[in-house]
């Protein structure tokens, strides 16, 4: 599955409740979208700007929309594109997962009175399997796949480490995984960390 789909599933309980604040999660999802495009060879980062390499779609609606926008205008910073993609990343990824049959809408009542619609995973074990894959990637004998390393770095930045790695990790483990990534990926991750910090500060203003 795409990185954004994995992150969305990891970030929610089986009842569909997010584990972290939506502004932070939206930035995390936008980070996953940009990194997905980078891993596919469509975009990169040069001199602090996101640049386009190839306009051919990767057949992921959110990522392809971002790719089209990147090619349509002047080169902008990773922070600019993170904010732009984050503006609707949560709803679009949720909608795509629902359309594909991985999520479903469930009607419940808050306090037994107020009707509430929640979006829940059809198979709660999906998140369990993603967590197991990441744990094995970090603790197994082989080199961590780049996509899994990037997802682990996003998990750390968004604040999901304790939800994903339930039995804990050695101190600094995720930071070391992130530090080993390509500088272009680290540029996007660093920008995401800044945007999440800014979102957190705005919440208290």
Image (cartoon, rainbow, N blue to C red):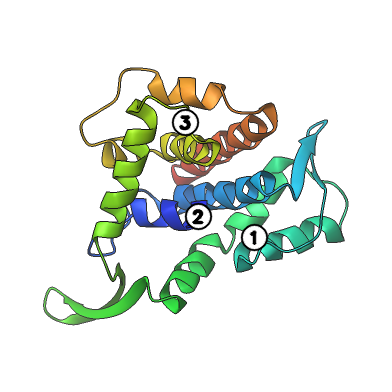
Vertical side of 44 occupied by 10: above or below: below
Of mark 2 and mark 1, the one earlier in the sequence is: 2
On residue 73, the disc is none
- Residue 158: x and y in percent read 44, 41
Of mark 2 and mark 3, the one earlier in the sequence is: 2
Q: Give the residue at x 30% y 67%.
A: 121
On residue 4, the disc is 2
Q: Give the residue at x 20% y 31%.
A: 167
Q: In screen coordinates, is 72 left or right of 27? A: right
Kind of element beneath mark 3:
loop
Q: Which residue is mark 1?
A: 63
Q: Quadrant of residue 181?
A: top right
Give the class, few, some or many, for how many residues have Cα within 10 Å of label 2's Cα (few <14, many ≥20). many
How far apart are the two marked residues, 2 and 3, measured between alpha carbons? Answer: 18 Å
Q: Are marks 2 and 1 in contact (CB under 8 Å)?
A: yes
Q: Which residue is mark 3?
A: 144
């Amino acid at each position: 599955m795409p990185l954004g789909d994995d992150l969305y599933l990891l970030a929610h309980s089986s009842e569909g409740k997010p584990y972290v604040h939506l502004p932070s999660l939206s930035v995390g999802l936008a980070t996953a979208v940009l990194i997905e495009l980078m891993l596919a060879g469509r975009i990169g980062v040069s001199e602090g700007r996101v640049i386009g390499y190839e306009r051919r779609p990767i057949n992921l609606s959110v990522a392809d929309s971002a790719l089209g926008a990147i090619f349509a205008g002047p080169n902008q910073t990773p922070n600019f594109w993170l904010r732009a993609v984050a503006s609707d990343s949560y709803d679009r990824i949720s909608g795509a997962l629902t359309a594909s049959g991985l999520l479903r809408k469930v009607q419940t009542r808050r306090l037994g009175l107020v009707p509430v619609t929640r979006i829940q995973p059809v198979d709660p074990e999906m998140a369990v399997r993603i967590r197991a894959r990441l744990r094995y990637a970090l603790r197994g004998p082989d080199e961590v796949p780049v996509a899994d390393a990037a997802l682990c770095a996003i998990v750390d930045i968004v604040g999901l480490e304790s939800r994903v790695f339930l039995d804990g990790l050695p101190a600094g483990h995720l930071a070391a995984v992130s530090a080993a990534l390509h500088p272009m990926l680290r540029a996007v991750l660093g920008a995401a960390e800044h945007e999440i910090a800014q979102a957190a500060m705005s919440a208290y203003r």
